[in-house]
Each structure stands twice: as C-alpha cells, then as structure tokens.
Amino acid sequence: MSMQHRTPARLGRPLSVIGQGCWQIGADWGEVGDDAAQEVLGAALEAGVTFFDTADVYGDGRSERLVGAMRARVAADATAAEGLPFLATKASRRAEPFAPESFTEEALRGWVERSRQNLAMDTLDLVQLHCPPPAIYRDDRVFEVLDALVEEGRIAAWGVSVETCEEALISLEREHLASLQIILNPFRLKPLDEVLPLARAKGVAVIARVPLASGLLTGKFSATSEFPENDHRRFNRHGEAFDQGETFSGVDYATGLEAVARLEQALDGEMALPEASLRWILAQAGVTTVIPGASSGEQARANAAAGSAPSTAEQDVLARFDAAVHETYDALLRDSIHPRW
C-alpha cells in the first residue's frame, strides 16, 4: 500500500498525507533516547513519510537537531531518489515573557537563525508561529518580518499553529499564509464548520495536529493508566503548564474514555481505533497532512499505514465510524469543546 500525497497551492510541494510529529522525540512524553528517536524517524521515512513537523522548544532544540541529522543523512545518500523530506518547524514559544511585546524583529530573526543552525539548513522549508499570544495574529509588524525572511531566502514559507478556530480564521486573512496547523481529531470537530472550507478555498495547507488526542484515541488507556512525571499527560492534564486544549485535546480524561468506548463499539473490531481516527481526519475536505507522534518505529510504521487509499470495505467501516464520531461528539463533547476552541 503506497502513501498518498497532497499538494497545497501555497506550498507548491507534494506532502505525504501522514506526516511525523516530532514533539515526542524532543521532550515531555517520557524518555525517548537518541537511538529510539532515530528509529522513529527512519521508520517513518521508510514508510513513505516526507513531512516532518518539529519546533525549537521541543527538548530545547533537541528535536530539531535530531530531525536535521536525519535530513543530512538522506542528503548524503546518493540513492535517495525521492528527494529530501519537507521539514516544518515552529518558533515563538521561546519568547520571554510570552507576551506580544516579546515579538520583536530581533527576537523573530533570532528564533529563525537558531532553527537554521539546529536543522543545518540555509533555507527553512516552513516556519510556523507556535500558538502565539492572541494579539499577535493581528500584528502586521510580525508578519512583515516573516515576509522579509522569505525575501532574504532564510525561510521558504511561513504559517501559523493555532489554538482556536477564531485564531485560524484571522490568520487565513493573511495573503502570504502558506499553512495552518490546528487540532483536529474525532474529539475536536469545530474546524469542520468554517476553517477547513476557507483554507481549502485559499489553497492553504492544513496540518492536523494532536490527531490521536495525546494517545486517548489509541484506545490503550484506562482509568488506572499512569504517566511518567516528565510526561505532559501527567503534569498538564488541566493546563497547569501550558495551553489546556493541548493535552488530550482539552477533553476531560474520564469523558474521553467514555467517548473512546463508543467509537470502538462502532468499529466492532474491523479497524483499529488509531487507524480509523487518522483515516477519518484525512477524509475531511481541506486537510493536507496529519502529524501523529511516535515513540517507537513500530508506532511510526502503523501511523504511516493509514496514509494509503482506503479499500471499498474500509470506506464502509469509515462511513459507520464517521456517524459515530458525530453522534459521540454531540452527546459527550460539544458543550464543553465547541465554545472554547
């Protein structure tokens, strides 16, 4: 089964529909050693993944350096007929304080320069503002700096990663916006209303993040599951350390487990829940790529397998799953999720 690709107009490059999220190989998901991290990246490449998403704050640059080293190995391999992988990074979470006044031209240039060094790239493929303070989305000065960095050849394109649909819609007003990264999964349906149709109309790439709701949609967790102290699913369950909507997509853990049970019942063992979740996201018009994370090569390969075209039988299962997603969202999640994100 071969990986599908989509080419958003404003990026102009074909991207694998399953990308590799690289937060887990940086930090905040328990221990993932260098060997395990390289196993993840190598397995993703071998499975047809060409899109890798990282950020300057993941492990204070560790994730970027690991991804950059992977790219360098591909570049050095004369037999790499598929070309270089597309590397997307994110910047702005290093702002101190994390407030609009910290988003100076000097700071923006400094963040980009650090990523260029970490990734060992003269021109970064894509730099995304990393869920900046809400006021930044209307700050023309910030986006003028990003445009200048494109003109100078330091970055090829820029995008934004957002927390809310409101921020996404504001961002889509920007003429040079190349990509929009937003949480989209069977627990977070609001982007389907306005964000995806508008992004599709404008040719903006949509990168679906947190696709498995921090692992809830793997179906592997229970009420007694425990997480390491350095895992955000333990220290940020209610937004204690950073944005509340990130961990478990902002879904109450117990409610999420109930929702998972309903979705698994609809699948009736005919497709694994994580595969169904990834395929469901890809079926939403306007989505370019989905970026699940992985802490092992086995996970990376399983995620990538969802990027093949579904068979007729799989389409029937996914139609049943889609109905269950909407029914479950309306019954358990809409009232707490839809008004916030």
Image (spheres, helix red, strand yellow):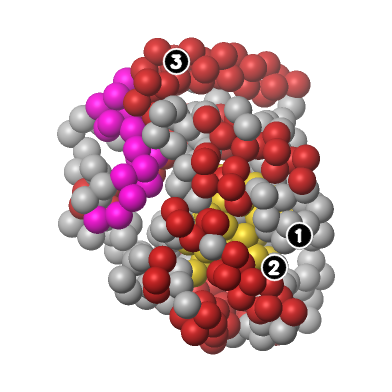
Residue visible at 49% across and 60% down in the picture: 136
Rendered location of residue 173, percent (x, y): 67, 50
Which residue is depicted at the point 39% across and 39% down? 249
SS of the residue under disc 2 = loop
Q: Which amino acid does label 3 sit on?
A: Asp
Compared to residue 268, the image places residue 336 above or below, namely: below
Looking at the rendered image, the quarter that the N terminus falls into is top right
Which quarter of the figure has residue 80? Answer: bottom right
Whether pointer 2 and pointer 1 mark residues with C-beta atoms closer than 8 Å, the reply is yes
Residue 128 place in picture, x, y as percent: 57, 63
Element at badge 1?
A: loop
Residue 59's label in the rendered image is: none
Give the residue type at disc 2: Ala
Near-viewer residue (255 or 286): 286
Label 1, residues with CA under 10 Å away: few <14, some 14-19, many ≥20: some
CA neighbours of label 3 inside 10 A, class few (<14), some (14 to 19), many (20+): few
Disc 1 residue type?
Answer: Leu
Which residue position is annotated with label 1?
11
Q: Which residue is the site of mark 3?
A: 330
Say which residue appears at 63% left-offset and 32% top-offset: 194
Specify the segment rendered in magenta: 241-259
Q: Which of marks 2 and 1 is nearer the N terminus?
A: 1
The answer to whether residue 74 is seen in the rendering is no
